[in-house]
Image: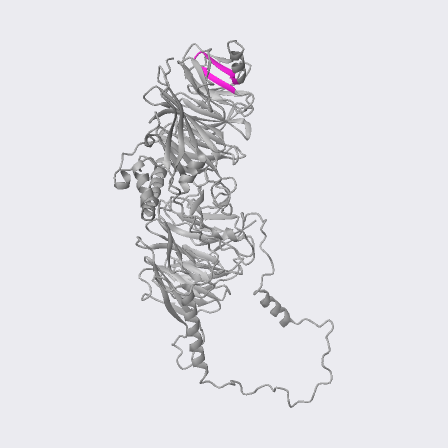
């Protein structure tokens, strides 16, 4: 082969917005030109070497740290090489090459020693005339080799013996990989758009998938920690599957690479525009350079001025599992990097993508065409290898030309570029850590609202008392000054008898304090314990919520009523009626004495638990639209609810006493103390705030698919997250904990969002990043709700397949599928005191689950 060196150590550099000097992100270490194109050939790259066909029939091995001086050529094939693969062990480093004539295994270090001693390096032939091999893979112990030829898979050992021939695919087998956690299991993919799971012990097919994509499957990657594997197709679709102990496969995540790229570039564009106001000179230098590391076909110098480019498909050429890209640069006290979080490097025809496997989102990209120093702009084949903890190496061949290039990506510099426009300096926290400020900038703040309201209440109380008599009773107990002195001052009672009244007082007093802690190590509630129908007719349940002590359960119904059950769902419920629309949401005060209901008739009522008449009623004059969310807030000092594109804060006073003469006049009052509008949205779809402890943070989501965080201590919106989901968020679920359990304070900064067709996301308020994503349940048209357990370990979600799903918060794979429901599970609630879960369906059924 005629090789002409085109570029040695040419470097693509970027200007850091933080300090202004140039930093290296990607380097082209070496590039040569072949005599023939090498597109669509399996290349190989490992921790030390990379390899590609040399003059069709020979193997060229480069040392990735010094590819020029350490090149090695291996001869042995008589026909064109079609696939190359390295073994998994570092010593010895095994290399396998495949052509239509032979399959040869080479010991790279032994071959190098042979050349140094003047001998011709020789390999071991392990297969002959197996056909056109497209993919090779070593087993984890390097003792077995899987060879994909046409629609068959040949399993070979190192003694030129065929152990098995696996047949069943209807198209060409494009890849196969051994499971690192179970050596006798092999997974294969094919152009027939399916994957199969094989048992090599019995040479039997264990599992066959349905058709996954509209295009052939091209790449396969194993992730040994969570027993997962990832498939990639020719149209940029990735699917993450979990291989269960029963050899069944469950899809836990689906990623559309093109859509994720558009979201990523849109997010970067917005950050660039926001930063332009604060650092115009730096952004101008970045814009003129045009070569931002996160540039893509959707973001370049022209895009910053409003230009655009055509969309192209992104076939997945190769994938490689690695550690989390941003873990070394994020704050140590942040839970943005949960245990087990990892990344996936994806090689496509136009660049490299780093995907967070917990969220399915892009953390960084390297686009070939946006780096002027790279020789290859469109890749035909790709191999990715980890050279060290802070570098990855990528060997690519040109799609249409004859170039072969070795690229080096510097992980730390890439991660720094990713974080340069992050919002970590905001450092928001759900738990109030500062005092209430005295004066607000743009709006009356929480401190002034509370102090003004309290002062008004005290003045009103003082004015109402001064005209009343001091003594209200006909008989007044004597002070004792005129009675005879006592002779015996004190006589203790020994073993006093306990009356029934004293027992009743003990029981009542126990409600005020926590007598039993929530078991933090309990199992998830998955066994059906009770089932009850809320009505004789199928009546959809809209919402459910437990009281703070876990003794009562409030159920809002579509038939304009609310029911209150005991925690075991036994006996007849208490019925609350009067509103003229479906009850959208219910809420409890901390002392469990008052209930709040918001209805579709644009009303909000507050009820005493032991009564049938509302104490406070807010009507249509208060609401422009029905309240989608309503609750008590700031330790029951306020009522917080949304209406249209704004949410309101009301101070209230509840009094159920009546004047015998003017019994129609209610003494309960409320007063508007603040309105906050969510920007660029027609309606707030949901909101959430913590009531169990002092917190200034209110989370809102709108029909514009954005999340917005309000800090009521400063009286304004502080952070906005655009495109939080592909659809509007219909529920925000915060980690409120429980008075029966204790969690680390940082855990309360976690919250969940759910949207129709877009799964569930876990967020960290301190960084406002999505840290995990949960899929597997069916949610295509109904706003199925979610719930978080008091211990913070389990997530429950409703589903349209008549089941409820339980997840562990640290894993994307659900642990229980609660079946037996007769309709869509629309609402759920965990008991705050004991491990119990109640589910509600659209046909009016309540089901109670226990561990």
Q: Can residue 293 be seen here?
A: no
Give residue 442's position: percent from left, percent from top.
34, 61
Please indicate whether residue 263 sits to the left or right of residue 830 in the image: left
- Which residues make up the magenta segment? 94-108
Residue at 71% across / 85% down in the picture? 486
Give the colour scheme of this rendering.
Answer: one colour
Eyeballing the image, is 33 above or below 369? above
> Which quarter shows the N terminus?
top left
> Which secondary structure type mostly characterizes the magenta part of the structure?
strand
In the rendered view, does 219 fall on the left or right side of 487? Answer: left
* Picture coordinates of residue 601, whole percent (x, y): 34, 62
When asked about the image quadrant of residue 443, the answer is bottom left
Residue lying at 49% horizontally and 67% vertically, measured from the top left? 593
Asked whether 101 falls inside the magenta stretch, the response is yes
Q: Is residue 11 visible?
A: yes
Specify whether residue 340 is painted magenta: no
Number of numbered markers: 0
Q: Which is more toward the observer, 397 or 463?
A: 397
Q: Nearer the viewer, residue 13 or 210?
A: 13
Q: Position of residue 517 (x, y in %)?
A: 59, 56
Residue located 68% across and 71% down the image: 498
385 shown above or below 57: below
Q: Is residue 70 above or below residue 290?
A: above
In the depicted view, which residue is nearer to us: 203 or 548? Answer: 548
- Front in this rendered view, residue 58 or 422: 422
Residue 12: percent from the left, percent from the top? Answer: 37, 31
């Amino acid at each position: 082969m005629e090789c002409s060196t085109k570029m040695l150590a040419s470097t693509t550099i970027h200007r850091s917005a933080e300090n202004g000097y140039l930093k290296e992100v990607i380097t082209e270490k070496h590039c040569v030109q072949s005599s023939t194109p090498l597109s669509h050939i399996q290349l190989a790259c490992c921790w030390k070497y990379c390899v590609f066909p040399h003059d069709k029939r020979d193997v060229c091995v480069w040392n990735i740290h010094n590819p020029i001086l350490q090149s090695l050529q291996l001869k042995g094939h008589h026909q064109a090489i079609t696939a190359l693969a390295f073994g998994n062990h570092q010593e010895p480093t095994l290399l396998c090459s495949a052509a239509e004539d032979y399959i040869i295994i080479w010991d790279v270090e032994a071959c190098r020693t042979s050349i140094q001693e003047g001998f011709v390096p020789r390999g071991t032939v392990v297969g002959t005339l197996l056909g056109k091999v497209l993919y090779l893979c070593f087993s984890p112990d390097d003792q077995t080799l899987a060879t994909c030829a046409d629609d068959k898979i040949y399993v070979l050992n190192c003694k030129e013996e065929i152990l098995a021939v696996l047949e069943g695919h209807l198209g060409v087998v494009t890849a196969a990989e051994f499971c690192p956690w179970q050596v006798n299991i092999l997974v294969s993919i094919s152009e027939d758009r399916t994957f199969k799971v094989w048992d090599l012990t019995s040479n039997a097919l264990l599992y066959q998938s349905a058709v996954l994509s509209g295009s052939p499957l091209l790449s396969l990657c194993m992730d040994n920690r969570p027993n997962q594997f990832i498939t990639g197709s020719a149209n940029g679709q990735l699917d993450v599957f979990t291989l269960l102990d029963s050899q069944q496969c469950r899809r836990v995540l689906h990623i559309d690479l093109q859509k994720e790229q558009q979201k990523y570039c849109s997010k970067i564009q917005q950050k660039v525009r926001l930063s332009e106001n604060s650092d115009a000179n730096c952004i101008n230098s970045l814009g003129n350079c045009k070569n931002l590391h996160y540039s893509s076909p959707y973001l370049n110098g022209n895009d910053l001025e409003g230009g655009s480019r055509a969309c192209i498909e992104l076939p997945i050429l190769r994938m490689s599992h690695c550690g989390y890209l941003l873990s070394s640069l994020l704050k140590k006290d942040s839970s943005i990097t949960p245990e087990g979080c990892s990344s996936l490097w994806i090689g496509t025809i136009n660049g490299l993508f780093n995907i967070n496997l917990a969220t399915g989102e892009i953390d960084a990209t390297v686009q070939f065409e946006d780096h002027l120093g790279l020789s290859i702009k469109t890749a035909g084949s790709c191999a990715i290898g980890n050279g060290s903890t802070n570098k990855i190496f990528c060997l690519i061949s040109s799609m249409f030309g004859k170039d072969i290039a070795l690229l080096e990506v510097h992980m730390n510099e890439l991660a720094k570029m990713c974080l340069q426009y992050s919002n970590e300096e905001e450092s928001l926290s759900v738990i109030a850590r500062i005092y209430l400020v005295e004066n607000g900038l743009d709006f009356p703040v929480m401190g002034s609202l509370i102090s003004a309201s309290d002062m008004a209440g005290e003045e009103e109380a003082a004015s109402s008392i001064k005209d009343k008599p001091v003594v209200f009773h006909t008989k007044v107990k004597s002070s004792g000054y005129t009675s005879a002195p006592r002779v015996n001052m004190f006589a203790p009672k020994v073993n006093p008898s306990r009356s029934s009244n004293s027992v009743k007082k003990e029981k009542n007093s126990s409600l005020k304090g926590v007598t039993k802690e929530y078991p933090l190590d309990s199992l998830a509630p998955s066994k059906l314990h009770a089932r009850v129908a809320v009505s004789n007719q199928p009546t959809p349940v809209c919402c459910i919520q437990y009281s703070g002590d876990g003794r009562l359960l409030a159920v809002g119904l579509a038939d304009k009523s609310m029911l209150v059950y005991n925690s075991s769902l036994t006996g007849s419920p208490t019925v609350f009626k009067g509103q003229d629309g479906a009850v959208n949401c219910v809420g409890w005060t901390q002392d469990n004495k008052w209930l709040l209901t918001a209805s579709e008739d644009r009303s909000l009522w507050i009820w005493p638990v032991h009564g049938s008449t509302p104490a406070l009623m807010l009507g249509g004059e208060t609401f422009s639209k029905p309240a989608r969310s309503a609750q008590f807030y700031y330790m029951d000092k306020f009522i917080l609810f949304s209406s249209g594109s704004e949410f309101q804060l009301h101070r209230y006073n509840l009094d159920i006493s009546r004047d015998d003469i003017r019994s129609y006049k209610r003494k309960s009052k409320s007063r508007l103390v603040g309105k906050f509008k969510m920007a660029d949205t027609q309606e707030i779809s949901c909101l959430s705030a913590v009531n169990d402890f002092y917190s200034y943070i209110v989370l809102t989501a709108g029909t514009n698919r954005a999340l917005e965080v309000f800090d009521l201590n400063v009286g304004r919106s502080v952070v906005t997250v655009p495109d939080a989901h592909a659809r509007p968020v219909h529920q925000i679920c915060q980690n409120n904990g429980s008075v029966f359990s204790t969690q680390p304070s940082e855990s309360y900064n976690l919250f969940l969002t759910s949207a129709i067709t877009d799964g569930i996301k876990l967020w960290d308020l301190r960084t406002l990043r999505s840290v995990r994503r949960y899929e597997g349940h069916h949610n295509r048209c109904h706003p199925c709700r979610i719930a978080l357990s008091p211990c913070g370990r389990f997530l429950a979600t409703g589903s349209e397949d008549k089941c409820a799903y339980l997840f562990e918060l640290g894993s994307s794979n659900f642990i229980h599928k609660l079946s037996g429901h007769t309709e869509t599970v629309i609402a759920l609630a965990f008991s705050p005191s004991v491990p119990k879960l109640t589910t509600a369906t659209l046909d009016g059924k309540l089901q109670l689950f226990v561990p």
